[in-house]
Amino acid sequence: MNDYITIALTKGRLANRTMELLGKAGYYCEEMNEKGSRKLIFTNEEQKLRFFLAKGPDVPTYVEYGAADIGVVGSDIILEENRRVYEVLDLGFGKCRMCVCGPEKARELLQHHEMIRVTTKYPNIAREYFFNRKHQTVDIIKLNGSVELGPIVDLGDVIVDIVETGSTLKENGLMVLEEVCGISARMIVNQVSMQMKTRRVREIIRNVRDCLE
């Protein structure tokens, strides 16, 4: 299968947007349009391309270990997972913000660098932000579900999470207090593939970049 380029896509909206973009760049996979298909890997034999869908946090893992040559995933996952991959393109969609959020009363705690508790799905991003950028000591509590519950049930003072519209925050009496960074979909590449499949990988990157411009 060394002749093939394997691309890992993040399940859901990102996969759909990615396939639209790849289509504009001249890459496609009819197998992915088959309704009710239980296939795990979709192949375009003519273009020697393979595609598979994965959960966001797994995409950088597949790429780092060479199960995929190329991956498309949100930059929040790239920052959180910190895998050994090349980040080559900002695809410009899936835009949102990583923010520190909480009730209004928590604003003062942030301004005075007080010891606080932070609930989040992104402990590494939260740690980097508070420890290295703000130089504020915090107790980070990892949650897998609705982190907005943290301040509501007094598990934490603030949350670090992705904000799109902010409607969920507003409904629960929370607000954006500080912005950590902007988030968008990125293309990542396996380090060995960049060396061993240079021509094809760089061609895909170039053609996708041309569509973005």
Image (cartoon, helix red, strand yellow):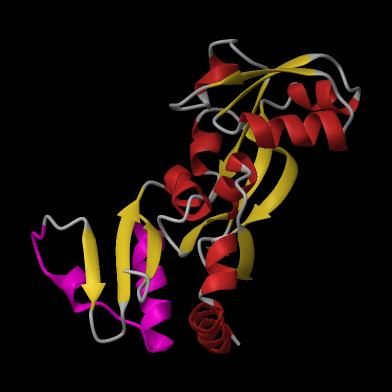
Indicate the quadrant where residue 25 lies: bottom left
The N terminus appears in which quarter of the rendering?
bottom left
Q: Is residue 43 above or below residue 142?
A: below
Residue under the point 39% across and 60% down = 8
In this view of the protein, which residue sits in the foreground, 63 or 78?
63
Asked if one can make out residue 186 in the rendered structure from this viewpoint, the answer is no
Residue 164 lies within the magenta run: no
Residue 115 location, x and y as percent? 82, 14
Q: Is residue 60 above or below residue 146?
A: below
Residue 56 location, x and y as percent? 44, 48
Count of numbered circles on the image: 0
Magenta range is 11-37
Residue under the point 23% across and 72% down = 43
Residue under the point 82% across and 20% down = 109
Asked if one can make out residue 107 in the rendered structure from this viewpoint, the answer is yes
Residue 49 location, x and y as percent? 32, 75
Residue under the point 48% across and 62% down = 72
